[in-house]
Amino acid sequence: MVFSTEPVVRLEKACIFQGITAILQDVSFTIDKDEFVFLIGRTGSGKSSLLKTLYADLPLQMGEGHIAGYNLTSIKTKEVPYLRRKLGIVFQDFQLFTDRTVAENLYFVLRATGWKDKSKMKSRMVEVLMRVGLGGSATKMPHQLSGGEQQRVVIARALLNEPSLLLADEPTGNLDPEVADGIFKLFQQINKQGTAIMMATHNYELLNKYPYRILKCDAGKLIDSQTAPSDQPIY
């Protein structure tokens, strides 16, 4: 079996726009398939815009971008759902269907991404819930779960299609420190099992505690801790 060494993300001289406004310019970086990367920066610095560009919610208008085998500069609208099947996306505000059970939330994604076989759907649903520590929560409604448990459902949802990259936008921002630590450790487990992770965060305690690579949005640029001068702290 031949394994690809191509990075799961590669941007070269990309310009990230919100409407007609350039938020980040001359963005160049790669993420390998087993990397864990923090994305930091002040509110409004471009973190969410960069993530949205990576999952093709915002078009890449300038530069080059490749993610999970797709070219972001030439991707067609009909191809976007197929790109997102290769990605896991975790939001701070959960975005669960509040009128559906945990299982129904997961089944919705499976059906929307082309799964047909009901037995395989059930098996996959059970598998991801067990993986995030919610094996007994399939029949619960979101309001019956704590914030940390709801975020675990969101992570389970993101894992359904075995993504090569998980994009997380402030996934612990609304959680108390102890719960947030448990969620972060879950991300670490997922990463160790082979999924690349790019996690936007304001939690600088994590940056001090875990020596992962850091990308920082600052003054319209993206600074990479791998290439930044050693005498200039990145945060």
Image (cartoon, rainbow, N blue to C red):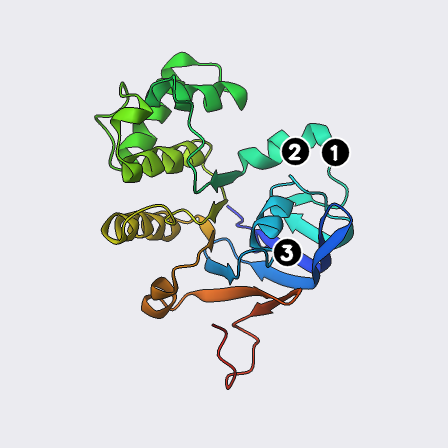
Quadrant of residue 142 within the rendered picture: top left
Image location (x, y in percent) of residue 60? 73, 48
Q: Which residue is mark 3?
A: 10
The alpha-carbon separation of the residues under discs 1 and 2 comes to 7 Å
| Mark 3 residue crowding within 10 angstroms, few (<14) / some (14–19) / many (20+) | many
Q: Which residue is mark 2?
A: 80
The nearer-to-camera label among 3 and 2 is: 2
Q: Which residue is mark 1?
A: 76
Whether residue 83 sits left or right of residue 19 in the image: it is left
Q: Residue at x 36, y 47 (%)?
A: 190
Whether residue 34 sits left or right of residue 65 in the image: it is left
Inspect the image, locate mark 1, and give the three-letter code of the amino acid beneath it. Answer: Lys
Image location (x, y in percent) of residue 103? 34, 20
The alpha-carbon separation of the residues under discs 3 and 1 comes to 18 Å
Q: Foreground residue, 117 or 24?
A: 24
Tag 3–tag 1 contact (CB < 8 Å)? no
- What SS does tag 2 mark? helix
- Indicate which disc, 3 or 1, sits on the residue closer to the N terminus: 3
